[in-house]
Amino acid sequence: MRSLFWRILATFWLAIALVAGLAMLLGRALNQDAWILNQHPGLDELDRQWTELYEQQGERAAQRLLEERKREYRIDVQVLGENGQQVVKGTFPSRAAAFEARHGDDRRLPWRRLTAEYTSPTSGESYLFIYRIPHPELAAWHRGSLFWPLSALAIALVVLTLFSLFLTLSITRPLDRLRGAVHDLGQTAYQQNSLARLATRRDELGLLAKDFNRMGERLQGLIGSQRQLLRDVSHELRSPLARLRIALALAERAEAAEREKLWPRLSQECDRLEALISEILTLARLDADPGAAQSVDLPAILSKLQDDARLTAPEQQLQIQLDQNVRLQGWPDMLERAMDNLLRNALRFNPSSQPITIAVRNQGQRVELSVRDHGPGVAAEYLQQLGKPFFRAPGQGGSGHGLGLAIARRAAQRHGGELLLANHPDGGFIATLSLPIRQQAS
């Protein structure tokens, strides 16, 4: 970060200093005459003052002004009228004029020649002023005249340096905070409020901090859920393994006749353990890349669910409600497993005298796949926890492992949708997969 800081600071500072210096040098190089005419104290307002004296007080007063300027600043002045003749005698000696005529190259002359034209606002007459400033006088004035420009340039550079420093800090400090947040996230020690102040900025860095906060919160949630899942898996596997160990210990000490009675129990515990591991693997596979989405044949899925229900629970009645022209993009196997889990829950609690309703409806830009039973429902305080791995609401029996709804919820999220769980107003329980119609592969 320090390297980036100094690079940005040096780049801004050097760029500004270079532009300012070059602009000043270029301006002076291209406009030297104008600079001298506007800034030299011996020429300041001389044309206006001379014209007023000449038109109001005559040639003597005007000549006197030129002689005073020569004594003070050593500047020779000639004034020509519109006819090209001298209006007054001026202060430029005739011998100097002859010398200048013989050496037309200004670089060989001991003075600098400048010209300026002035038009009287009262008479309308135009006068041409010819100034000749000795090079020593001009060099002495240059040394003094550069003080204020150089001072202004120094002040400007100080201000621009402070501005560059502020701009550099406004970039590098947020980046340093982001670097620290990335480091904390890598060490699983990320604090969600570590970038709260940076996220209040209304620029690109503020947007980046907001996105990073959301990402960090999501990752922390995933890490926490994975840790919780591992704890829950360990707990759930411990119970059937303990029962298997007890049953094996009893079988070792039992007589042959009693041992025959224990084999069905051992087989049952193995089946339970296998079913639990299968559901855990299914839940884990939902986090893997499922490949490209494809068109889902909803009637085929519903028909298969109906056939399976006839085999496992022939006493139960199923009602299928399918809207026409329902189109959905997704992963058929994943949706079939999710709907199968929802139907199994309904079969577990639904009385045989009432039918289970499976409905597929178009809802604008979404498709809703719902399974409704007429069972006892779930207490309101447990509805928010349904769908969490290994959670079973009290009073719902212990035949399941609490993974069916978790698998259905993860499948809905994979499709960009959600799982809605609620007690039906007319009694019973309804679980709904609300999915977007247009789904792209993730």
Image (spheres, rainbow, N blue to C red):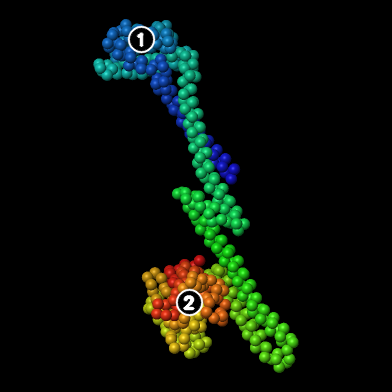
Task: Specify the farthest residue to the left.
Answer: 123
Left or right: 234 as drawn, with respect to 382: right
Q: Quadrant of residue 370?
A: bottom left
Q: Is residue 122 above or below residue 317?
A: above
Front residue (pair 319, 119): 319
Q: Is residue 74 above or below residue 367?
A: above
Q: Measure the C-alpha gap from mark 1 to mark 2.
A: 110 Å
Q: Is residue 209 above or below residue 22?
A: below
Left or right: 279 as drawn, with respect to 61: right
Q: Quadrant of residue 365?
A: bottom left
- The circle drawn on residue 65 is 1
Q: Quadrant of residue 28?
A: top left
Question: Do callouts 1 and 2 mark residues in contact (Cβ within 8 Å)?
Answer: no
Within 10 Å of disc 2 (Cα), the crowding (few <14, some 14-19, many 20+) is some
Judging from the image, what secondary structure is the residue with disc 2 in?
loop
Name the residue rendered at 42%, 74% in the picture. Answer: 368
Judging from the image, what secondary structure is the residue with disc 1 in?
helix
The mark lying in front, picked from 1 and 2, is: 2
Q: Amino acid at mark 2?
A: Val
Q: Amino acid at mark 1?
A: Leu
Name the residue rendered at 58%, 54% in the picture. Answer: 182
Name the residue rendered at 36%, 9% in the picture. Answer: 65
Question: Mark 2 = which residue?
Answer: 378
